[in-house]
Each structure stands twice: as structure tokens, then as C-alpha cells.
Amino acid sequence: MLKSLTLLYIEDDESTVRSFINAFGDYFKEVVIGRTAEEGLELFEKCSPDILITDLQLPKMSGLEMIKYIRQANSSFPIIVNSAFSDTHLLLQSIALHVDNYILKPTNPYQLLHVLEKIAHVITLEKKLNTTREIMQTIIDGIPDPILYIEPDYTISMMNKAAKEQTDESVLVNKCFNVAQKTAPTCSEDSSSCPMSSVKKTKQPITLRHIRKDREGNKRNVEVYMRPVLDAKGEITAYIEITHDITKYLSVQDELIAETEKLSHISMHDSLTHLPNRRLFMDRIEQAIERKSRSKETFGVFFIDLDHFKEINDSLGHSSGDALLIEVAKRMQQVIRKEDTLSRFGGDEFVLIIEDGFTIEHFSKIAEKIQKLFEEPFLINTHKVISSCSIGISLFPQDGVNAELLLSNADVAMYASKNAGRHRFQFFDSKLI
């Protein structure tokens, strides 16, 4: 391991230098010699050595002063003091400067070799760790979603390129919650719990949805996935957080839901009047039958057909006929409740379910209200159009216990009212068949 390293050796005694070179020169890739502390600082900058061995008693600047300067540049650089002084004060000063070892002269070569091999082992491990870290950084930089490697105290020790690009440069990012521009360990504006809190308790991965701000201050919907990094004992040593922006996905999802609702509405409603069509009406009448069968109550089915509608279409045109159907639908909606269902079956036929009735008189009053709606002429494309309607009424359960029979009997009653002179209503009676 020493063979791949460069050693900086600072010693002003030539015989000691020769002895060291003879003993250790072949162990290293290169041994760089400095005779003064000033020369040592120059060589430290120029040669970028892996290890420093220095005496403390040097001309002009002392070895301790040189070490102070080196420590300012690199706090973890391996330094071995090789001195003839065993003074406690010097030893304490060396410890304060985080010297890796203090070996007294005359130097025991086996002791020094043992120390050098230990340091070389640490350096090799650190280089491997740095190489692994660089490989890891390269890998995670290729991932488009922001990734953070978070220490238990919320410190971010690694982040990928995507995370850096989405981080506001004006915010001092050293804690994970700073990424969301927070000053405390909370991640979102929607009061969701911090994922780390849950992972700490369960030691299991978790996925949460949060709202965060991007570099421009725009709110983004994100999915935060966090998992623990466990040691051999199963204790958490760090956390990995991956954030996936789902803003566009949610926007598309909302559009799809809106489009689905629109298509569902179209499939269930008449395109002209926007009233429920035959399909939705059949669903509503089945629900009414189910409810009233349980409560033993009645409801009415009104079959409404406009009188002389064909003549209006022929004289004024189909567009005027369509306009009349729209206006008729609007007027009829004024006399029914929200829980009732008014449907257009097609052509000039409307069907109405009235659920809150109990007596013939009640259903008769509603029929009279509908008839009264036609007393005022309709203004259609600057023309005053006089219209009327014929109504047939069937009641559940006496006139039918299923939708087909109720509709059929209401239709029979409607034709009876037309045959009786139009512009009137008729309840179903078995005698009409």
C-alpha cells in the first residue's frame, strides 16, 4: 500500500535524512525531502504528498508552526512528528493540532513502519471510499428525479444533479428541510408529517405526497419516497430520499377525470335540452321502484307529448322546433323539485318522475301546473309560438311494478288525452287498453 504513496519528509540533519532514505526509500512511490519548514510548505503545495513526517526543531520556522499552516489547508492530512523532544508541552501542542502520531528519536524503524502501514491502510480505504462515492455520484446524477442522502441530524451529505438544479441557490442548503425553504424539520405546506419521522419509528420505507416550491417559487406537487440505510445491527445510519414531481401527472389526471365526467354526462343526457336521456331515466326509475318498494309508497310517471309539434316543425323549420323543445324543457324544470327527474325520450316526448306524491290530487296539481306553463306563447326566433301538451300519468305500484309497464301505461294514458282533444292530462285506467 505504501508503494502507491508519496511521502514528504522534513528533516534538517543530513545524516538522519540519509538513514531514512536507506531504510524507507524503497517503500514509497516517491520520497520528497525538505530541510526547512518553509521548504516543507512549498513542497506540500507543489507535490500534493499523501503523508508528512517532520521534525519539530527546524531552522527559522518550527515544525509546529508549519503544521498549523498545513492544518488550515487540510484538517485530515496524515502527519507524523519524529522528534528528539519528549517534552509534555510539545506533545500536547501536537495533539491539539491533530497529529496522527508522535515518534521519538532515535527512531525505531519497525515502530515507524507499523505506523506508516496503518496510515497507508486508512488512506487506501479513504481513496476507495472516495472512488465509490464518485461512482455513486455519477450514477445518481444520471437519475432525473432529485435524490438526497440524509444523515440522522437532517444534514444532506450527498445530492444528485437534479436535486441541485431544483434547489434555490439563495437558500443555504445543509439540511434536508432547507430544500423546501423551511427553517425547521418540516417538509411541506400541507401539514403532512415529515417522512423521516415515520421511517425513524418503523424503519420501513414510506411514500408521501407533499407540496414544495421550485427555484422560481412555483408550487409543485411531489411524491416523496424515503427509505432507511441500516447498519449490521439494524440501526438507522442515514436516509435516502427520492422526490418525484407529479404536478403534470395530476394535471393530466384532472383533465382525464373532467373529460370522463364530460363523456359520462354526454352519454347520460340529451344533447339538445341537456335533460337526462332514456338511459339515465331508466336508471332513475329503477332506483325509485327500489326505494318505494321498501317504503310501500307511491310515485308518478308523467308521459308528456307536445301537441301539433309536427306542424310547428313544418312551418317554421327544424331549428325553430329544436328551440321550442329547449324552451319547453326550461319551463317544466321550474315546477319540479331537484329530486324529481325530467327526461327527454326523443322527438317531442318528455317523461317525468314525481316521487313525493301520495294522492291523485297531488299528481293532478302538478299536471295542471305543467299545462299552465303553455298558456304564455313561446318566443322562438322572433316568432310567437303557441303550444300545448298532452299528459298521461301512471302510478306505482297500482299501474305497474316495473319500469316497462309504468312507461307503457303512461304512454297509453297520454294517447287517451290526445284522443280526448289534446291539451289535457289523463291517469291510466285499465279500461283504456
Image: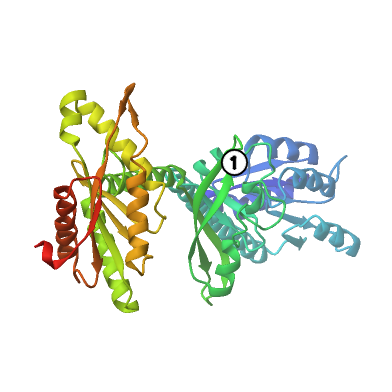
| Image mark count | 1
Tell which of 263 and 308 is nearer to you: 308
For residue 126, side relative to residue 292 (left or right): right
User: Residue 274 in the image: x percent, y percent?
Assistant: 31, 42
* Point 86% across, 41% down: residue: 61
User: Residue 226 in the image: x percent, y percent?
Assistant: 51, 60
* Point 78% across, 51% down: residue: 55
Asked whether residue 106 appears in the rendered view, the answer is no
Specify the amino acid type for callout 1: Thr
Q: Residue furthest front?
A: 421
Q: Label 1 belongs to which residue?
A: 167
Image vertical order of residue 45 relative to residue 195, above or below: above
Asked whether residue 47 appears in the rendered view, the answer is yes
User: Residue 228 in the image: x percent, y percent?
Assistant: 52, 66
The quadrant the C terminus occupies is: bottom left
Image vertical order of residue 218 relative to residue 341, above or below: above
Secondary element at image label 1: loop
For residue 92, side relative to residue 117 (left or right): right
User: Residue 221 in the image: x percent, y percent?
Assistant: 51, 48
* Point 18% across, 69% down: residue: 400
Classify mark 1: residues with Cα within 10 Å, few (<14), some (14-19) or many (20+).
many
Tell which of 54 and 305 is nearer to you: 305
* Point 67% across, 66% down: residue: 111
For residue 197, side relative to residue 398 (left or right): right
Q: How is the image coloured?
A: rainbow
For residue 25, side relative to residue 227 (left or right): right
Name the quadrant containing residue 362: bottom left
Q: Residue furthest top?
A: 382
